[in-house]
Image (cartoon, coloured by chain):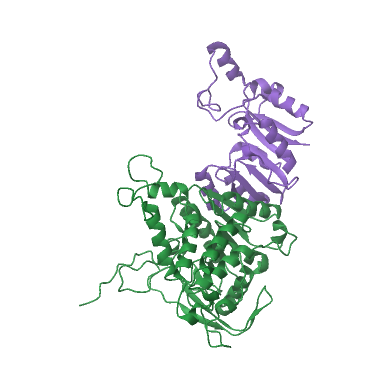
Amino acid sequence: MLRADLQLIQDWIAPHSRVLDLGCGDGSFLAHLKTTRQIRDYGLEIDTANIQLCLEAGVNVLEQNMDKGLKNFGTGSFDTVILAHTLQALHRPDEIVDEMLRVGKNGILTFPNFAYWRHRLSLLTGGRMPKSPQLPYEWYDTPNLHHCTISDFDELCRLKNIKVLHRTVVDDSQHSSPLMRLCPNFFGINAIYHITR
Amino acid sequence: MEAPQKKIPADSVGLVAPQKLHFSEPLPLRSGRTIDQYDLMVETYGTLNSDASNGILICHALSGDHHAAGYYDAGNPKEKPGWWDYCIGPGKPFDTNRFFVVCLNNLGGCAGSTGPSSLNPETGKPFGPDFPIITVRDWVLSQARLADRLGIRQWAAVIGGSLGGMQVMRWAISHPERLRHALIIAAAPKLSAQNIAFNEVARQSIMSDPDFHQGRYYDFNTYPQKGVMLARMVGHITYLSDTLLREKFGKGAGENFGRDLRGGKLSFGFDVDFQIQSYLQYKGESFSKNFDANTYLLVTKTLDYFDPTVDYDGNLSKAFDKSACKFLVVSFSSDWRFPPERSREIVDALLQAKKDVSYLEIEAAEGHDSFLLPIPRYMKALQAYMNRVANECEGGKV
C-alpha cells in the first residue's frame, strides 16, 4: 500500500520522466513509480538499512548526504525532484529548495505544518514545545532543525520567485477538508507543494 | 597412512582446476605492438546455462590471478582458498548455483598466462623486458576473445575491485553490448600523481636490485627478490589504513598507536624493534617468492597508463556515453589509495551520462584491502544486487 501522501504526489509525475527522490527511504515509492509511470529512478539516501532495501528493490540508490549539496547533479538533469518530510531536518532548507529547482524542472516537497492549531494550542496553554504524531520528538533530541509553517513557506516561495503549481493541505490520513482549504495554516497538518521556477 | 583430508566448507566451490587456453589470432595492442599468440589461464565455477546468459567475469587486481575461489589440493589442510572465496560459491554473492563464474590470469601475468617469464618463440628465451607493455584496454580485448571462446555473447555482469574495477569500466566503454551489469569496487577513474609516485618507488626498488640485470635475470639464473620485496612492502602500506595498523599492532597497554614492540624492549640498533616492521618484511618476502619482477613492473605501468577518457577529450561521462549496462559502484571509507572521492568521480560521470547507477560508501577500517574482505554490509549489498542480476538471467521477476 502506497502512503496516501505519495498517492497524491504521483499524479504530478509525468510518465517516462527522470525523478530524483531526496531521502528516498526504502525505495518503495521509486519502485512504485517505475511500475506505474515508467520513470528513470534515482534516490539519495544515507541510512544504510534503507540503502540495502533500495538495492533489494532494484532502484538506483546513491549514498549521498543532501545536506552537503547536490553539486554533482547537472542543471536541469531531472524532470522532478522530490523531498518528502525532510525539509525541516536540513541545515539550509532554502538552499536545498534552490538546488531542487536547479537540478529539476519542478519539485515536490512535503513538510509538517508547525502552525497547525493543536501545535499552537499546546504552546499557548502548556508553554512547552509541541509534541504530536507529526512531531514526536523531544526538543533536545530531534532531527528537525527548522520548523516552518505554510505561511512561512509561501513567503519563501514569494521571495525566491518560485511558482506554486499545486498546494495541498491534508490531515494525517492525507484527507483534505473544507476547513483546511479555508484556513490551511490553521487546520492543515501536512503541506504538499508542487513548485517550479 | 592416508593423507589428512581437509574439511572443505559447504559454501565453497570445492576442488577446482585451472585450464590453459591457447589463442592464435594476433592481439593488436594499444602501444602499436602485437602479440602473435598467447595462452590464458582460466578458472570457471558453476555451469553456463542453455542460453549462455548467466556468465559473470571476475577481473583481478595487481597481484591476483585466475584462482579466485576453491582449493587445489584435498590433501593439504593448510591450503588457503582462492583470493575472492568470500564472494564466490554456492549461496555467496557470486552464487555458483546460479552463475557461471569466469576468472582468468591476465596477459602479462605470472600465473600461467603468457607474460614476461614465458618463452619468446623467436628467441627460445624468456621475453623479460621485451614483453610489450599491456594496457587495460588490451586485457579487456583478450577477455572478450575469451568470452567468444566460451560462447558468452553478453556477460550478466563484469566485476572487479581496484585495478579489476578499471577493467570493468573499460568493458562498459569499449564493449557496451557485451555486459548487462558493471560492478566497480574500490577503483578510480585514473591514477593520481600520488598513486603513480608509489608505483615509481616500487619500480625503482626492483630495477635497482643488482640481480635485476635489466630484466634479463632469468638468463643469469637469478631473481631480484629484494627489489620485489621492497616494492611489495611499499605497496602493502598503501593497501592498509592507519586505523587498521593501530588496531593490529596496538594490543599493548593503552593507546600506543600500533607501536607494539617485537621483543618487549628497544634494541638501540637498526634491527627490528616494532611488530609492524617484521610484519611488513614478512609480507614483502612471502610475496617476492611467488611473483615475477617483470610482471610487477608491467602491471604498475598498466595502472599508470589507465585513462578511459583518452579518446574522449578527457571527459569521463562522454566515455560512458555508449555504455548500456547498469552500474554498481562501491568505495570504502578508510581506503586512501583509491578513496571514496575517486569513486564519486565515476558515479558523477555516470549520472551526467544518464546511466543507471547505485553507489555505496562502506564504513570499514581495513583500507583499500577492504574490497577483498567479508565486511557484512558489503557482502549483503553484493548479495542483494547480484540476486536481482540472477533473477534476470533466470527470466524471473526482477
Asked if residue B160 lies left or right of residue A39, the reply is left
Considering depth in this image, is B119 or A175 the residue closer to the camera? Answer: B119
Q: Is residue B96 visible?
A: no
B17 relative to B172, above or below = below
Residue at left 66%, top 62%? B307
Q: Give the image quarter of residue A108.
A: top right
Give the colour chain A carries in the figure. Answer: purple
State the quadrant of the N terminus of chain B: bottom left
State the quadrant of the C terminus of chain B: bottom right
**Furthest-front residue in this view:** B269
Q: Which chain is green?
A: B
Q: Give the image quarter of residue B171.
A: bottom right
Query: Residue B136: x percent and y percent?
Result: 61, 68
Q: Give the image quarter of residue B338.
A: bottom right
Asked if residue A155 lies left or right of residue B365, the reply is right
Query: Residue A62: x percent and y percent?
Result: 60, 48
**Furthest-top residue in this view:** A125
Considering depth in this image, is B154 or A193 the residue closer to the camera? Answer: B154
Asked if residue A159 lies left or right of residue B368, the reply is right
Q: Is residue B179 visible?
A: yes
Asked if residue B293 lies left or right of residue A179, the reply is left
Residue at left 55%, top 26%? A135
